[in-house]
Image: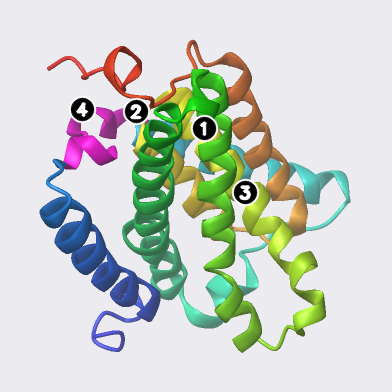
Amino acid sequence: MVDATGGLVEVTLLVNLAFVVVIVGGIILRFGDLRPRDIGLVRADLPLGIGITAGTWILVQVTGVAALLLQGESLALADSVIRVGILPVLGGFVGQVFGNALYEETVYRAFLLPQLAKKFARQSWGESPRTAFLLALLASQVVFTLVHVPGRLAGGVEVGDLPVFLTAPFVLGVLFALVYARTGNLFVTIGLHALINDPVLLVDAGGVVLVPLLLVVFAILVAWPSLLTWVGGEESRPEPSS
């Protein structure tokens, strides 16, 4: 399939789609007796998610071009685009949006985080909605971080070096969780997650392109109108208007 699509469909997409079908569709939705909207999959939220993702991508490209011009560098297509072609480059992003980012955001941010917040809110030591949310935030993202351990070990990371290599997944997991809590829109977090993993650069501008991505994340955390918590009853995520 990878060869037949010229690289537009890649292994990351296929593997994570299998996870989505089995874990999200088969276990969380079917056996958890939940609806798609209960785990953030709300059709009405999609346009905003696409808009923020597209706007952020444009900002990333503009930042890359500006950085090269300020350094006196000539503009040219990114080496990856020239070397392997546009379809495999786009395939990496497609694999993130419809595979890796979709799976991880649905499971760890839209399902595990609110479920833990509800559970902690029912405990005597979690009576405060804020405390329940913070405990759920830390617990869910620790789980998200630990899931990355086998991959890091398989990639050659020594056991003693794991804390250093797991810092980024934990910090990003917390940021994505806060973005979802802030916006209540899973598609926003999926888009930002996909861009951070694979920004589909048209020019080789280096790590500077992460700056606008992180600025968008922090802007959302600061400027979005309300911080949502999932503690059940009156505190649960409001139903979107139809």
114 shown above or below 156: above
Q: Are marks 3 and 4 in contact (CB under 8 Å)?
A: no
- Quadrant including the N terminus: bottom left
Q: What stretch is highlighted in magenta?
A: 36-48
Label 4: few (<14), some or many (≥20) within 10 Å?
A: few
Task: Assess whether residue 44 is covered by the magenta stretch.
Answer: yes
Q: Is mark 4 on a helix, strand or loop?
A: helix
Q: Residue 219 placed where, x, y %?
A: 62, 24
Task: Assess whether residue 151 is covered by the magenta stretch.
Answer: no
For label 4, the residue is 44
Which numbered disc, 4 or 1, marks the residue closer to the eye? 1
Q: What residue type is labelled 3?
A: Leu
The residues bearing labels 2 and 1 have C-alpha atoms spaced at a distance of 14 Å
Residue positioned 45% across, 34% down in the render: 120
Q: Residue 226 placed where, x, y %?
A: 48, 13
Q: Are marks 3 and 1 in contact (CB under 8 Å)?
A: no
Label 1: few (<14), some or many (≥20) within 10 Å?
A: many
Q: What residue type is labelled 1?
A: Val
Residue positioned 75% across, 42% down in the render: 66
Residue positioned 55% across, 47% down in the render: 139
Q: What residue type is labelled 4?
A: Ala
For label 3, the residue is 172
